[in-house]
Amino acid sequence: MPEDQQPSPPDDKRPTRRTLVAFVVGAGVVAGAGALATQLLGGGPQKTPPSRTLTPHATATAATGQRTDGLLVDRLLQRPGFTVAHRGGSLDWPEMSMEAYRQSVLLGVNALEISLARTSDGVWFGLHDATLDRTSGTTGFVAAQHSWAKVQAHRITAAETNAPQQPPQPYLRFEDLVSAYGRTHTIFVDPKVVPTDHLGELFALMSALPDPTGTFVAKGYCTAQAWPVDAAARGYRTWGYYYGSELAADPSMLTTTQARWSWLGLDYEATADAWRTLNATGKPVLAHIVPSRAKADRALSLGAAGLVVSGVREVLAR
C-alpha cells in the first residue's frame, strides 16, 4: 500500500485519565467547488462569527464576517503560544462536530483542526478513522463505502470527552466548517484516510475561498508525501508532526522528511533534546496534543511556537 494511504500513527493518543484536561494558551459534496463558492462568495447568507471570538491574528466586521487585516496564517505566527483546537476540542465536546468548533471559537482559540474522510458519493466530512465505529459505536461502518445520507443517520458520541453525558452531535461536512469559520480562523486540514487520487477535490473545496493559501494549513504525519508536496506546490503552508520516541529510534526520520513541512510538530512528552533538535531547524514547532496546563507550560518553555490542544475549556476559561 502506498505510504500516503497507510493509516498514520495516532496523532492524539487520548489520556487514559479524565483528570488530564486539555490545554491551550491562549447532500453530497459540492460538484467541484461550485456550491461552496456560491455559499462563500455571496450566493447565500454569511455566518458571522460569535462576537466573543478572540482572534488576535485577524478581525472581522460584524456585518460581513470578512477579515480586515491580512492573511490568517501569517498573522497566526505573530501570536506566541497560539492555540489550535484539536478536532474542535475533542476532550470537551463530540469531536469534529459543529458544536465543538462553535464552543472553541467562543472561548477564543486562534485556529481549528479537522481530519477528513470521504463518503462514497464524494462528501468530505470530519472523521479521524476509516470507520464510524469509535465515534458512533457502529461495527465495520467504513465511511468510504457509504453515502453521506447513511453517515448522517449516525451521531458522534461524547464517550471520549470529559463530559460523556452530553448529547451526541451530527457529523460535519468540511464545506460547512469552512462556511462558518473560513474567513476568521486558520484551519488545519488533514485528509487522514482518503486516497491521494481524491486530493484534487479537496483542493477545489479549499480554493472556493478568496484567499485559500492564507487560510488553510495542510497537516499530516511527518512521513506523508503527496499531500504536503501537492499543497506546498499550490502555495499552502504545511505542518508535519513527529514523536520524540520515533526520532530517537530513527534519527534520519527528521532529515529525510522535514523539507516537506513549513512548520513542524512534536509531542508534549518529547525530551528537551528532541525539542532542541526540532527548534534548531529554524521552523516553527507546535506541541501536540497537549492534555494539561502543566504540560503546555513545559512545551512553551522548551520553545513551542504554538499548541495543538484537545481540551479548550480548562485553558481558555478566564
Image (cartoon, grey):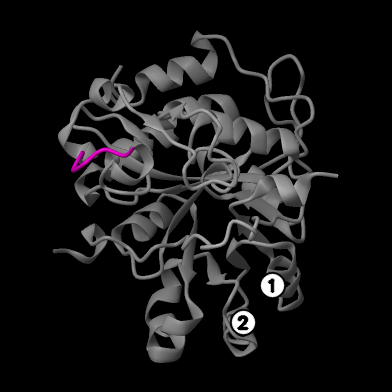
Circle nearer the N terminus (2, 1):
2
Pointer 2 residue: 275
Amino acid found under the numbered disc labelled 2: Trp
- Tell me where the magenta segment starts and ends, as one range: 137-141
Q: Residue 305: image x %, image y %?
A: 69, 66
Q: Residue 241: image x %, image y %?
A: 48, 67
How crowded is the residue under tag 1: few (<14 C-alpha within 10 Å), some, or many (20+)?
A: many
When asked about the image quadrant of residue 296, the answer is bottom right
Residue closest to the eye, 262 or 179? 179
78 up-or-down from 282: above or below: above
Residue at position x 35%, y 48% from top?
Answer: 191
Amino acid found under the numbered disc labelled 1: Ala
Pointer 1 residue: 299
Badge 1 element: helix
Q: Are marks 2 and 1 in contact (CB under 8 Å)?
A: yes
Dominant secondary structure, magenta: loop
Q: CA distance from mark 2 to mark 1?
A: 9 Å
The disc placed on residue 259 is: none
Residue closest to the eye, 82 or 156? 156
